[in-house]
Amino acid sequence: MKPIYRFMTLVGKLFKIIIPDEMIVPILMGRLKGKKWVISSSNIECALGTYEYKKHILFAKEISISDVVYDIGAHAGFYTLLASEIVGFKGSVVAFEPLPQNFFYLKKHVEINQTSNVIINNVAVTNFIGVSSFRLVGNTYTGRLDDNGEIEVETISLNDFVLKNPDLIPDCIKIDVEGSEYDVLKGASHIISNNKPKIFLATHNEFIHKKCVDFLKSYNYNLESINNQNDEIFAYYNIE
């Protein structure tokens, strides 16, 4: 895969030069090959099909037809579309994205790909229902909940979401929320305790990483690093 990956990186650089930002293109490779993608919505690697390559390959391997998958911090929807493709019409994907710009593209990608098994939510996931401040930091990938944030977003916990949607108990949860991951886990404590979903977790500092690891281990989860990166975790329940 490495030579192909290097080639696709060169293709991506060419894309940036010659293709208009708002142009819709087919994703070039992988499980999402042929799906439609807006160039300007996110990292060019999403359009290439190489975005977070090893992580998304593992993610695809660990979900199945008819699963319910949560994409928390969905951004423009790469993992949402990937999960949608795999779970099929008997499964469901529930995507959560608070930032209006990202949500616009998430919604657009769901619509232009005529995806019927996805539910999108313009909210931030944490450990309470309410309203919170959200701060943009650098780019649309690094926004986060912050008391000094410049915009207000609605918030929800996964426990409350499942209470209201008991037919959407997750089999797998992907979490990438730029620093609020421990709060997401706390807000999903009942789900984790009772349903033991697989969890793909990105952590964004050492302190929160340790809290998340300790939390998951307290529920008897096994933890594996993804791509030898300590801040990318695949967690699954240890039945022994």
Image (spheres, rainbow, N blue to C red):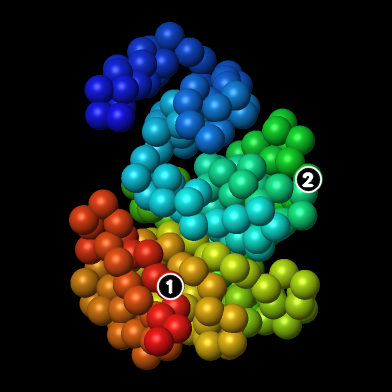
The amino acid type of the residue labelled 1 equals Tyr
Instruction: Mark 1: give few (<14), some (14-19) or many (20+) Cα within 10 Å.
Output: some
Q: Secondary structure at mark 2?
A: loop
Q: State yes or no: discs 2 and 1 in contact (Cβ < 8 Å).
A: no
Quadrant of image for the N terminus: top left
Q: Is residue 126 above or below residue 38?
A: below
Q: Residue at x 43, y 9 (%)?
A: 18
On residue 236, the disc is: 1
Q: Earlier in the sequence, mark 2 or mark 1?
A: 2
Q: Position of residue 54 (x, y in %)?
A: 34, 45
Q: Secondary structure at mark 1?
A: strand
Quadrant of image for the C terminus: bottom left
Q: Residue at x 28, y 73 (%)?
A: 209
Q: Position of residue 69 (x, y in %)?
A: 61, 60
Q: In this orientation, which residue lies closer to the viewer: 146 or 11?
A: 11
Q: Is residue 158 above or below residue 79?
A: below
Q: Is residue 166 left or right of residue 213?
A: right
Q: Residue at x 61, y 76 (%)?
A: 158
Residue 82 shows up from this direction:
yes
Mark 2, mark 1: which one is toward the viewer? 1
Residue 38 shows up from this direction:
no
Q: Residue at x 33, y 64 (%)?
A: 233
Q: Is residue 197 left or right of residue 18?
A: right
The amino acid type of the residue labelled 2 equals Ser
Q: Is residue 145 above or below residue 215?
A: above
Q: Is residue 48 left or right of residue 114?
A: left
Q: Quadrant of residue 215?
A: bottom left
Q: Is residue 97 above or below residue 173?
A: above
On residue 116, the disc is: 2
Give the spatial CA distance, label 2 vs label 1.
28 Å
Q: Position of residue 231 (x, y in %)?
A: 27, 62
Q: Position of residue 132 (x, y in %)?
A: 55, 72
